[in-house]
Each structure stands twice: as C-alpha cells, then as structure tokens.
Image (cartoon, grey):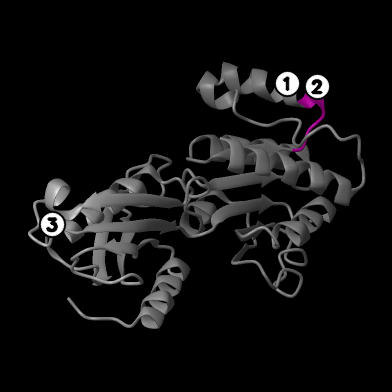
Amino acid sequence: MPNFHTLNLIEMAATKVREKKKVAIITVVKVKGSAPQIPGAKMLLVAEEINNSVDTGINDNIESFSGTYGTIGGGNLEYQALKEAREIMRENVAHQHRIHYFEKDLHRDLGMVCGGEITYIIELLSPPDQLIICGAGHCGLALYQMAKYLDFSITMIDARKEYADAQLFTKADLIVDSFDEEVLSQKLRCDQNTFIVIVSKDHPTDFKLVRYFLNKEWKYLGVIASKSKACSLKNELSKEGYLTEKIEKICAPIGLEIGGSTPAEIAVSILAQILQFRILQ
C-alpha cells in the first residue's frame, strides 16, 4: 500500500469526490500507550457505483470499493476501521452524522499486542446531490441562481435552444436542450440523492415529464401546478396504474406556502421545500 503525505491524501479525496465517488477519510486523533500510528495518520477508502445498464429507474447499482490509500497502522486495527467505513458508506448518510468516532483498546478489542488505546474518526465525503431543473424560464432561472450556492450538482433542461444556453447557466454541470425521453435517458442518471423540479413552459410538458420521472429513482419530485391541476394530475396517474406510494410523494403544488408569486419568491419556496427533504428526511 503506498505511503501518502497528508496533503496528497486530502487532494486525492477532493479529486475522487469530483469524479462522483464517495470517500471515507479515517484519521487517528488520539493515542494512549503503545500504538501502530500517531495522531494525524490518515487513510482513504474510495467507493464507486458500477452501473450495470442504462437508467432503468431501478436502483441496480453495485457499490464497489475501488481502493485504499495511506495507512493508520495496518493489522486488525486497519481491518476493523475499513469495515466500519464501508458500513457508513453503504448507509449513504450524505447530510447527517458525517463524522463518526471510534475508541479502541488495541489488546482487548482487537487482539493486538501493542496494548495501547487509539481513537479515530471516519468522515464521509459524498458527491453533491443532483438538482434537475426542467424548464429554464423565469422560475427555472431564479431557482438555478439560488441553488448554485447550496452545493448542488445542477442540470438544466429546456427544449428551447435560446433558453438551454450555457452562457446563462455557467455554473450548471449539465445542460440538456431536449425533453425527449430517449435523450433524457441517455443524459441523466437519477438516484436516491436526486431532486427534480418541473417548471417548464406548459402543463402538457410538465405532466409528460412527471410520467417520465415516476419511473426513475429520486428523493424529491416537484411540479408547478395549481391545487386543482395537481389533483387532476394525480387522479390521472392513479388511473394509469402508477404506484400510489410514488404518486403521493409528488410535491404538487410545488414549494412551501409562503404567499409569494414572483419567480424569485417561487424559487425560495421551492428551495425551502427541497432543503426540508434534504436535511430532515
């Protein structure tokens, strides 16, 4: 196993997260008595998802742990720490309890002859949540302008070429200039950390997109609509055989009721609702 300087490990962790991989950083923070490493020693565990096929809407990913870098001392200590890190990564708690503390008596807990005590932390770093904004008009633009400060990977979608303009959305990670389902399936990868906002130019497009995304995985799906339109949409979806539990998860009308009506106020209400889902659920 290569011996990496702390700065190199931190740079590597940042690189892996930018590559959409999850990283666990294991750091020794306290040592008492004889131990195989000193405070500050670090190692990384890198995980990535292997996609077996195109996006089917089913979570058929296999999480693969692609490598470890650095060391906190080897032996059973390292084995147990890596086992704990894998369990934390599989829980996928990207926004809660990011730092986990562990205290070990090396002899009693791990059977190591060193005999000392060691405390280490495991910190999970995950790629940013994905925010897909369907519709780059007034509301979509206002939402984008606010969301870019909240650590989202933003995708903008609009079939109108003049709206799906990279010059308007310089901080967007992806811009798609089509609502065609085949194009969306090629371009998008939805998962349990995906937030979808549907605010296109008309209700037929909005409702078509709702049907498309109902067959995908997501954490949040919101669509702009009046209460009567939203009720009509959900009734239609039920008659068409979509799962009741998924229909009930659709946020329509979208956003928290704050009483605003301008694009910026609507964007605030939508983002507030998204943050509720992101932080509290």
Q: Is residue 182 magenta?
A: no
Could you tell me residue 62's position as x and y percent? 28, 49
SS under mark 2: helix
Disc 1 residue type?
Ser
The spot of residue 17 in percent (x, y) is: 44, 66
User: Residue 79 vs residue 53: left or right?
Assistant: left
Q: Quadrant of residue 21?
A: bottom left
- Of the two numbered discs 3 and 2 in the rendering, the one whose residue sits closer to the viewer: 3
Q: Amino acid type of disc 3?
A: Asn
Q: Residue at x 69, y 62 (%)?
A: 148
Element type where label 3 sits in the image? helix
- Identify which residue, 101 or 108, lies in the foreground: 108
Cβ atoms under marks 1 and 2 closer than 8 Å: yes
Q: Cα distance, mark 3 to mark 2?
A: 61 Å
Residue pointed to by mark 1: 232
Q: Earlier in the sequence, mark 1 or mark 3?
A: 3
Amino acid type at mark 2: Ser
107 to 177, vertically: above or below: above
Circle 1 SS class: helix
Crowd class of label 1 (few under 14; some 14 to 19; many from 20; radius 10 Å): few
Q: Which residues are magenta?
A: 224-229
Q: Which residue is mark 3?
A: 76
101 and 51: which one is in front? 101
The span from disc 1 to disc 2 (Cα, nearest Å) is 6 Å
Q: Residue 249, position in %: x, y?
A: 59, 28
> Residue 185, percent across and down?
48, 52
Identify the residue shown where x is 73% and y is 21%: 232
